[in-house]
Amino acid sequence: GDSVTQMEGPVTLSEEAFLTINCTYTATGYPSLFWYVQYPGEGLQLLLKATKADDKGSNKGFEATYRKETTSFHLEKGSVQVSDSAVYFCALSDLSGGGTSYGKLTFGQGTILTVHP
Amino acid sequence: NAGVTQTPKFQVLKTGQSMTLQCAQDMNHEYMSWYRQDPGMGLRLIHYSVGAGITDQGEVPNGYNVSRSTTEDFPLRLLSAAPSQTSVYFCASSPRGGVGYEQYFGPGTRLTVT
């Protein structure tokens, strides 16, 4: 079945540092890939997405490129801020697998990011 | 436009009790789903619905029931609560099911079963 693996956390950085959160996936079909962010006490929000190979998703200074050859979708930001402190989830959706997969998002375990001033 | 709303925000149940978690969306979305979030496991799909009157099981459906009588509402029922159901529950909706659609999440319900 489908699966998503994220780098082990938590990640602690100083403000203005460079961020990378690794994400690799296994999928039967041709998935769409997502990064969701969860701020403390809130639900998940879509951060960015990519629907085909070599697409780059970007939002709020974050970027991720869909790499089919390495089955990866690593999240990067050049200069993090304290307000970026949150939990980040990599996820995929894939139509293969029939009824129980329809519309389903398969999530990684989440990476806690803390940014200090 | 309130998006996806969930009630209650917090709930404590005793083992064996039943309850319903409420979820509503005002975006006229066809697809709605319930996930549970457990530490170190990401989110896992419990049940989903592709439209009013149509529901199906996700990967962890045991102990939960759903129904979808209207486009807007998608309640999740715990039939006989167990400590293993202690979790944070998220409802989500998207315009349609399938690959590539963004899902919009509610703020969550934190459930503790003692």
Image (cartoon, helix red, strand yellow):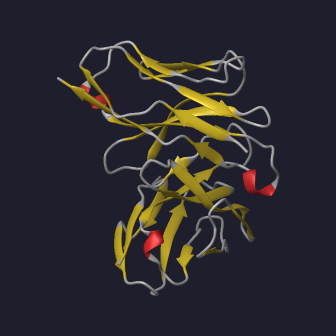
Location of the N terminus of chain A by quadrant is top right
Return the residue found at the far left.
A117
Residue B102 in the image: state x and y as whole percent: 60, 40
Expressed as whole percent of the image width and height from the top left, the position of residue A78 reads 38, 12
Say above or below: A86 vs B20.
above
The x and y percentages for residue B43 are 52, 51
Q: How many marks?
A: 0
Position of A64 relative to B40 (above/below)? above
Could you say which quadrant of the image residue A73 lies in? top right
* Residue depicted at x 58% and y 46%: B103
Q: Quadrant of the C terminus of chain A?
A: top left
Q: Determine the residue located farthest toward the front in the rendered image.
A: A8
Question: Is A64 on the left or on the right of A41, as rendered?
Answer: right
- Residue in view at x 42 percent, y 84 percent: B15
Q: Is residue A30 left or right of residue B92?
A: right
Residue B29: x and y in percent read 64, 54
Residue placed most toward the observer, B21 or B25: B21
Q: Residue furthest bottom?
A: B16
Could you tell me which residue is drawn at 55 percent across and 28 percent down? Answer: A23
Horizontal side of residue A92 vs A117, given as left or right? right
| Residue at 56 percent of width and 35 percent of height | A5
